[in-house]
Amino acid sequence: MTKVTKNNQVVAGLDIGTTKVACVIGVRAPEGINIVGVGVAPNQGMRQGTVVNIETTVEAIKKAREEAELMSGFSLESVWLGIGGTHIESFDSSGMVAIFNKEVSEEDIHRVIEAAKAVAIPTDRQVLHVLPQDYKIDGQEGISDPIGMSGVRLETSVHIITANAAAVQNAVKCTEKAGLQVKGLVLQQLASALSVISEDEKDLGCCVVDVGGGTCDMITFAQGSVVHTAVIPVGGNNFTHDVAMGLRTTQTSAESLKKKYGCAVAEMVTTDESIEVEAVGGRKPRTIPRRELCEVLEARAEETLQLIRGEIAEADLTTKLGSGVILTGGGSLLPGMMEMGDFVFDVPVRRGVPDRVGGLTDVVRCSSFATAVGLVQFGLEQEKLKSKHKPVEIARPATDDHAISHFAKKIKDYFSSVF
Ligand SMILES: Nc1ncnc2c1ncn2[C@@H]1O[C@H](COP(=O)(O)OP(=O)(O)OP(=O)(O)O)[C@@H](O)[C@H]1O
Ligand SMILES: [Mg+2]
């Protein structure tokens, strides 16, 4: 096998999800990115973004990694790791500095972002991303790339995303135990968005919702920047659980019934179709109308999408979604989800698939791979930007964003901007 670590043209993404671990390997190609390896393994060791069983998770990572390595012929040493789940929090912050030499340089950009980052973060939390929204020079707003512009005062507003430090450490620990180094940590829904939406959609404003097994991870863009992130603690597993309870069957059979015959809008299914439901406790299987299954799913789908709609409304973003809502993740594969979305949201809804990559497209052009493919795209983008100024702050596992040192920096920046 070829070693890939020294080669920044080959990048791997690792998505440790509630239901599965996905490992995707991509290489830079003249026309973009080619996916050359994909590995998937079911995972029982994760719950809503938090590791609940290290051994199970490590085994799943090893399995997914081996599969991806075998398929690609590359041997992996490091990966870009997705971080998500209910422990993610985010908020806006702003910073201001004096511009050295009256012309904005990369150094000024770094300083103003550092100034915006200088907020007290509790010690049990870790900064994942500091995402600049826009820049202001001497009060003039709406500047997206200020390098080279003249002025004396540079301001920025940023969206800061933090994660529970222990949850991050455990995900990193599992990855390392599986023999892989972590190159950088990436918010899962940021990665998903990268693989399923275009720059135009970000500019017009849209909300990407990754409907996973344990959670719905949301990220909203307006005028090209991230303005909001949120996590709804409901996912595809809740749909399956409802089916198991409603039809009195096992989780396994509920999961397969959902995937085979499920639909999020009961009316889309004809009344004369019937399905066989495995019973529990040695009872005989029953035959029920397929609609009965879909009615259970419809109630859950509507409730879940209403929770998302509520989150968008609470953040006052409803009018900013010119490009509507994009549903992705495995949970979005349930037929009828888009139709239910059209009913719940006042904006257009579409399914997001990672369709801007080449190579093994028939495998990865599926919503379940949105995060893993996005991680590859993110990683390759970062390699490319290495020499340029960094628009996105990357968290490394060893990073310790110490609030006091940032606070000291903020004071320093403040005085340097005043005098
Ligand atoms: N064809 C399908 N129809 C309906 N549901 C599906 C289908 N395929 C997958 N799912 C559901 O998608 C969910 C898994 O989605 P995904 O693979 O995106 O989750 P995950 O990344 O493991 O979880 P999370 O992102 O919450 O950590 C499961 O609940 C599964 O039942
Ligand atoms: Mg996921």
Image (tube, rainbow, N blue to C red):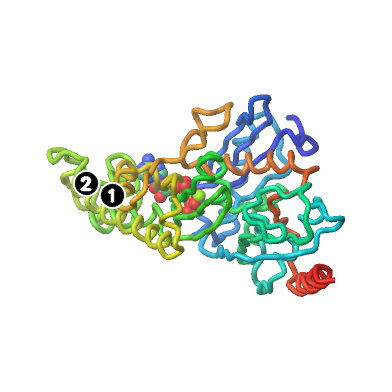
Residue 199 is at least partly visible in this image: yes
Residue drawn 51% across the image and 54% down it = 219
Is 279 placed left or right of 131 in the picture?
A: left
Q: Is residue 230 above or below residue 408?
A: above
Real-space CA distance between mark 1 and mark 2, rounded to the nearest whole angstrom: 13 Å
Query: Mark 2 = which residue?
Result: 266
Disc number for residue 25: none
Residue drawn 33% across the image and 57% down it = 241
How packed is label 1: few (under 14 Cα within 10 Å), some, or many (20 or more)? some
Residue drawn 77% across the image and 64% down it = 97
Query: Mark 1 = which residue?
Result: 343
Residue 277 placement (x, y as % from top left):
23, 46
For the image shown, how many numbered marks are present on the structure?
Answer: 2
- Residue placed most toward the observer, 349 or 28: 349
Is 253 placed left or right of 285 in the picture?
A: right
Q: Amino acid at mark 1?
A: Phe
Residue 25 placement (x, y as % from top left):
64, 36
Q: Quadrant of the N terminus?
A: top right
Q: Amino acid at mark 2?
A: Ala
- Residue placed most toward the observer, 101 or 276: 101
Residue 168: quadrant of the picture: bottom right
